[in-house]
Image (tube, helix red, strand yellow):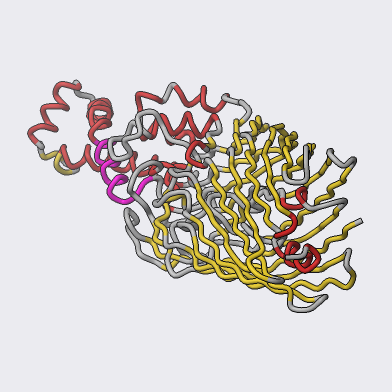
Amino acid sequence: MKKHNLYTGILLCLFPMTNVFAAAMDRSGQSISAFLQPNNYFETGISVLDPTVEGTEAGTSETHRHIDDMADDYYFPSAAIKLQLTENLSFGLLYDQPYGAEVTYTGNNIFVSDSSNTLLDSQKMSDLRASAIQKNTPVGISNFAQKAGISIATAQQMYDNNVVTALGKTKDLIDAGVATEVDKTITHLNGLLGKGATKAEVDSHNLSMIVGFQPNKNFNIYAGGAYQTIKGQLSLRGQATSIFNGYDLTMKESSGVGWLAGVAYQIPEIALKASVTYRSEIDHDADSIESTPTLSALGALSPQTAALIPKIAAASAQTKITTPQSVNLDFQSGIMKDTVAFANVRWVNWANFEISPIRFKMMSEVIGQIPSVNRPNGFNLLQYSKDQWSANVGVGRKLTDQWAGNVSVGWDSGAGNPITALGPTDGYWNLGVGLQFSPTPSTFIAGGVKYFWLGDAKGQIASQNAGQEYVASFSGNNAIAYGLKMGYRF
């Protein structure tokens, strides 16, 4: 098979949105295919995703209302340049936005605040009220004794025997007074809860600098560094978020460096090319601003820890974020004249990913002592339970000297189920088609569309991490993605 017959087909493997929608916060798929192109090469592209993720309150939620589409549209660009410096040495710069999130809850549901929201669900609030009344009854008896001008012992005896006074039965009077004071406190604490809706936004940028060594025409050994930035904002609202209703987090842009390495093998005469690329973790220490308006409520939930409230309020530290390590395996081969088959397999180590800002973590360690929560060591703001696996396979065919097309099928395992309600999908299947036009032998423009069948998932709040409990169910969802890419050989 002659190389020029596959020229357009090879470019089809640069389809602009291989992993535009993936598990957890994975977006770009971190492909290095541009670096493996022959000679000097430049490309730029943009991908757009329009997801629909709707659901229903379920699981531990006391209500079962509909949850409107919570997944915002987003787009991200990419660009790459590869230079063949010598016959055996190449250099490349690759830019992408590897991780991200765009979430906004709307409507009337447990992720949007309203006037009925309470610190805990109705059963826990009832238990809290009863416990508070019981604990404050001695105070009520003491206050009654003071007002009546009698000893506390006498007042206690009158309470125990429910003695009738001019104002009514002693026990009823004291219990009503204690209940009134407890209810005032609870009303005040519920008034600290946030307004608005649960929202999350994460943005990242990644620049990879790669050097490759080609000892012969078949092998390419490459390695390099990666400079990455990440920032994010989060607002937790609604009944589902409990005492964290009103919590806000701003993580300022932070930077970190990592590395990548890989090896590629090719047989140009039959358009065969295979590569495996490893990318390291990248550590970030993000300056963070946390707003915790319900912090004072911890004293009501766990009186013995009231002394911790000033310490939590004064706590300040950078938030550690480690973006995950990953491995990409890419393969393509000519299978007949003017036809190329291609495949990509990607693994991302999401199971080790977590975000735990300091005040959130300290509050979670208090809340985790509540028997119904049962997280004695606290819990993370965000984490995933499984690593992500994804695959994309397809066929590209040259139609004319200037036109070519491709079809592809993709699959993603997801990062666990139940999963955070900030990204409640369990993997996907997709089907994609693409078209490419090459006005000259050295230039092309390619576009495509993919339709995603998103996996049904159970959405968790942070205190349910690593368990099977959930507060919402998301099913029957989908997404559609569009991509455009232009390339130039020189």
Q: Would residue 241 be counted in the magenta stretch?
A: no
| Residue situated in front as seen by the camera: 193 or 412 | 412
Confirm whether residue 363 shows in the render. Answer: yes
Is residue 452 rendered to the left or right of residue 342?
Answer: left
- Image position of 415 (left or right of 368): right
Give residue 226's quadrant in the image.
top right
Query: Is there any visible trace of residue 114 in the rendered image?
Result: no
Q: Residue at x 71, y 35 (%)?
A: 254
Q: Residue 36, image x and y in percent?
A: 75, 49
In this view, the residue in front, 154 or 298, is 298
Magenta stretch?
A: 120-133
309 or 98, which lies in front? 98
Residue drawn at x 57%, y 49% is: 346
Residue at image coords 15%, 21%:
153
Percent x, y of residue 263: 67, 40
Image point (34%, 56%), residue name: 61
Q: Is residue 365 left or right of residue 411?
A: left
Q: Main secondary structure of the magenta part?
A: helix
Number of numbered callouts drawn: 0
Residue placed farthest to the right in the image?
Answer: 490
Query: Is 197 situated above or below 290?
Result: below
Q: Position of residue 466 (x, y in %)?
A: 38, 41
User: Which part of the image, by quadrant, shows the N terminus?
Assistant: bottom right
The percent coordinates of residue 147 (x first, y second) are 27, 29
Residue closer to the observer: 301 or 361: 361
- Image quadrant containing the C terminus: bottom right
Where 452 sits versus 208, above or below?
below
Of all residues shown, which one is farthest toward the left?
A: 161
Relative side of 403 to 284, left or right:
right
